Amino acid sequence: MIEADVVSEGQRLLARAAEENVPLRLLGGVAIKLRAPGELPAAFTRKYADLDFVTKKKSAGSAAELFRAEGYEPHVAFNALHGGERLLFFDEQHDRQVDVFVGSFQMSHKIPLDERLDVDPVSIPLGELLLTKLQIAQLNEKDVRDALALLQGHAVGDEDGDIVNAARIAALCAADWGLWRTITGNLDACFALAPGYDVPNRAEVEARLEELLNRIETEPKTRLWKLRAKIGERKRWYELPEEVAGGP
């Protein structure tokens, strides 16, 4: 039975996936809410419309079977065309869409996840969770709010767990100039917008943003990064993701 509350439904699907040994992890705003150490401050609370998951490449078929068994309608045409990277399902009763990314998260940029799904039983690792919010080339208010919420509740360090893994973020940015350009630009944007949110520890959030920026900048860059940096913004450095909506 699909839950009416989207957060409860995310938790239910995670439990069902664990019972069926399907590697499934949340991302998006629901993941940030569930990974928060307590209640999110009022400035960061919002309504969640849909659910976003990721599964391993080898488990795409099992994940598809799970969602069908749980009452979700597949987007047949989209899944046939893009099923190696992304699957779409619909909860028609509650007018909700479920995205299931396969092996990686790919919108404006590609964030590899296939080898990282065992880090936490609920969501993708916090470092990558932050990247999925900041990888969009044209940052929107919802993603700024979610990124600040994540940094409000979690320290920055060089490991996983309940810490935003700056080493992982820096390594990914050091290998991809386009990702580096988007992430650093959006971290700067978050820093500029942070004073507009009424939270008790804004200075701590701003310090974490600065720490991430410094960690990214000091990470040694790869040869491919340096070659792409010579081209710079003369060539578009991000993809324009396809928006998919409507029923199957």
Image: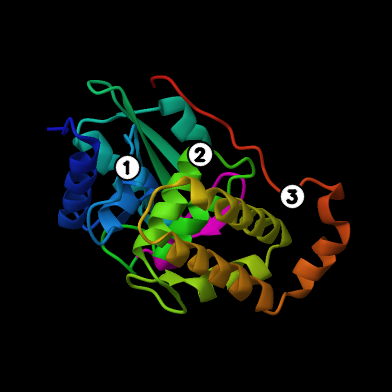
Q: Earlier in the sequence, mark 3 or mark 2?
A: 2
The crowding category of the residue bearing disc 1, from other C-alpha atoms within 10 Å (few below 14, some 14 to 19, many at least 20), is some
Under circle 2, the secondary element is helix
| Figure check: 33 above or below 142 | below
- Which sits earlier in the primary sequence, circle 3 or circle 1? 1
Q: Quadrant of the C terminus?
A: top left
Residue 106 covered by magenta stretch: yes
The label nearer to you, 3 versus 2, is 2
Rendered location of residue 170, percent (x, y): 59, 71
Q: Residue sitting at 38 percent across and 74 percent down?
A: 160
Q: Is residue 118 left or right of residue 214?
A: left
Where's residue 81, x and y in %? 52, 34
- Nearer to us of marks 3 and 1 is 1
In the orientation shown, which residue stands out farthest toward the left? 1
Q: Residue shown at 73%/75% (left/top)?
A: 222
**Residue on which disc 1 sits:** 45
Which quadrant of the view contains residue 67? top left
Spatial distance from mark 3 to mark 2, Cα to Cα?
22 Å
Q: Which mark, residue 237? A: 3
**Residue position marked by numbered label 2 in the rendering:** 141
Mark 3 closeness class: few <14, some 14–19, many ≥20 residues within 10 Å: some
Disc number for residue 107: none
Residue 47 sits inside the magenta stretch: no
Q: Of label 2 and label 1, which has the lower sequence position?
A: 1
Magenta residues, start to end: 103-117
Task: Determine whether label 2 and label 1 are within 8 Å by CB.
Answer: no
Q: CA distance from mark 2 to mark 1?
A: 13 Å
Query: Marks 3 and 1, how far apart in space?
Result: 32 Å
- Which amino acid, by three-letter code, is at mark 3? Trp
Which quarter of the figure is the N terminus placed in? top left
